[in-house]
Image (cartoon, helix red, strand yellow):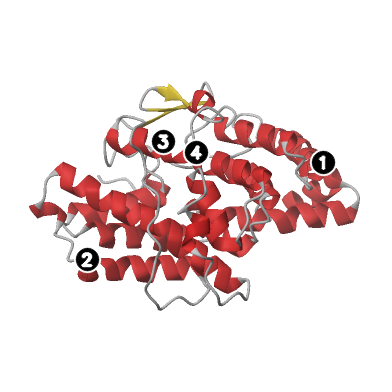
Amino acid sequence: MNEFKPGLEGVVAFETEIAEPDREGGSLRYRGVDIEELVGSYPFERVWGLLVDERFEPGLPAAAEYQGGGLSGNTPADLQAVTARFGAEWKLQKLIDISDDEAREDLRRLSAQFISIAAQSARLADGQTDRVDHSLVEQGKSTAERFLLEWRGEADPKHVRALDTYWICTAEHGLNASTFVARIVASTGADCAAALSSAVGALSGPLHGGAPARVLPMLDAAAESGDPETYVNDLIERGERLMGFGHRVYRAEDPRARLLKGTSKELGAPRYDVAEKLEQAALVALRKKSPDRPLETNVEFWSAVVLDVADVPPQLAPAMFA
């Protein structure tokens, strides 16, 4: 008899050799390299190369300026819509008809263009209708710096580091929702643009790429209450979701959360103190509620705090994940 598995828990749908999360030990490796060795040692674009090409060089190329139209300032929607159009505009061949190397080249072009589209859309969301001169953008030394330059016309080093760390920590994790959707679409033989566009659609959901956006209001409410412990207990008592805790894979601490927390502290995150107090209160309450299966802090909790360092507004969280 077939058995229903909520969230596909325990179901092996695909195989991957890219990400290796250690369920019990609280570690995560990309192509055999622990992410703790990557953060601070390699920029995101080199880690992208490791994930896609199995080598750091040449990595993700600098983005060509997006010169098309149709941007609305709703960045997740813009990424999804524009990426879908590239299949026809660039005359991309179907994945079933091309080699792995050709597919990687399509992915490289699309991923690089993502950066420019997201930056320009975020700029529109800020009410800026002019574009930053691309000669300034090209002066950026990393993907994160170029993104911030194209978005704001300036790139604070703290913001660059916060964004770079976040992108590395969330670059790959096996079969999360967006990857699952992309692989399903790719398995039909559709082109790379269709697969990526579908993934962005999944990322726009508040329980996936949008999850960090739900953390900041929770932190602000805890700070306003003046008593994070009571605030957390009241949330649990009312049966409300405590955003940023629990993960289907990790039974130990999420290593990405650990890295992002450390970066938040080093960069002087404005919400660090209240986040740490709420985290400790939540862990105590959750262990008391479910001693046999305690929930630990997940990546979304400290992602929200790190993105806040870079002044990324909550509505942009899904686009940053993309």
Res. 199 image quadrant: bottom left
Image quadrant occupied by the N terminus: top left
Name the residue furthest left: 97
N-term mark: 1 or 2: 2
Residue 309 % position (x, y): 70, 48
- Please report the residue visible at 28 percent of the width from the left and 57 percent of the height from the top: 195
**Dot 1 alpha-carbon crowd within 10 angstroms: few under 14, some 14 to 19, many 20 or more:** some
Q: Secondary structure at mark 4?
A: helix
Res. 251 image quadrant: top right
N-term mark: 4 or 3: 3
Dots 1, 4 in contact, CB < 8 A: no
Q: Is residue 226 above or below residue 19?
A: below
Q: Is residue 206 above or below residue 264?
A: below
Q: Three-letter amino acid code at disc 1?
A: Asp
N-term mark: 4 or 2: 2
Q: Which residue is mark 1?
A: 273
Q: Which residue is mark 4?
A: 168
140 or 107, nearer to the observer: 140
- Please report the residue visible at 51 percent of the width from the left and 23 percent of the height from the top: 37
Residue 246 appears in the picture as rendered: no
Q: Secondary structure at mark 1?
A: helix
Of circles 4 and 3, the one toward us is: 3
CA–CA distance in space, label 1 to label 4: 24 Å
Q: Which residue is mark 3?
A: 46
Residue 49 % position (x, y): 35, 37
Label placed on residue 90: 2
Residue 5 % position (x, y): 37, 46
Q: Secondary structure at mark 3?
A: helix
